[in-house]
Image (tube, rainbow, N blue to C red):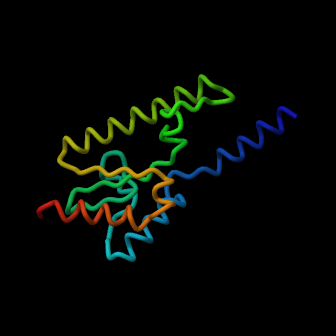
């Protein structure tokens, strides 16, 4: 039974993607319908943001609650392999802070959305990006 559980978990974890996630696709479609044109997962920008507006120097990240630690920050505990997951999620949170600070120091505006916010109202998230773009002189 133990091996079947491990195999199932392994299969589940192998299906998790780092780009073209459902929340990225949802926000991307909303932004596109509002006339925003963007670069996706641009490797030339530190941290490889999910969406990049280079002319305005805006980096947009779509953060899932699990991988970026929202539930962990709110006090939710892991049930299995606690040491591994706590260190992994803590490092992800630290990396998010490092990326945000680096980009801001380079003059970029960083916008981060939680996955649930994108799922509940992608147009509102896209509108927040438009509002930010309108405040930046070019």
Q: Is residue 104 left or right of residue 66?
A: left
Up-down relation of residue 116 to residue 36 (above or below): above
- Outermost residue toward the top? 83
Identify the residue shown where x is 38% and y is 39%: 96
Identify the residue shown where x is 19% and y is 41%: 105
* Quarter of the rendering occupied by the N terminus: top right
Where residue 102 appears, as percent x and y from the top left, is 26, 39
Identify the residue shown where x is 50% and y is 48%: 64
Report if residue 45 is visible in the image.
Answer: yes
Where residue 131 appears, as percent x and y from the top left, is 25, 63
Identify the residue shown where x is 38% and y is 64%: 124
* Nearer to the camera, 127 or 23: 127
Where residue 66 appears, as percent x and y from the top left, is 55, 42
Determine the image quadrant of residue 83.
top right
Determine the image quadrant of residue 84.
top right
Q: Is residue 35 left or right of residue 118?
A: left
């Amino acid at each position: 039974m133990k091996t079947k559980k491990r195999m199932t978990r392994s299969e589940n974890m192998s299906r998790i993607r780092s780009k073209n996630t459902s929340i990225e696709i949802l926000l991307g479609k909303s932004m596109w319908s509002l006339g925003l044109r963007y670069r996706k997962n641009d490797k030339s920008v530190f941290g490889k943001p999910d969406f990049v507006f280079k002319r305005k120097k805006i980096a947009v990240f779509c953060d899932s609650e699990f991988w970026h630690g929202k539930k962990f920050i709110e006090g939710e505990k892991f049930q299995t392999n606690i040491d591994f997951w706590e260190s992994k999620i803590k490092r992800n949170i630290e990396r998010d802070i490092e990326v945000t600070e680096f980009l801001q120091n380079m003059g970029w505006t960083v916008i981060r959305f939680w996955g649930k916010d994108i799922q509940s109202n992608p147009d509102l998230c896209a509108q927040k990006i438009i509002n930010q773009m309108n405040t930046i002189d070019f």
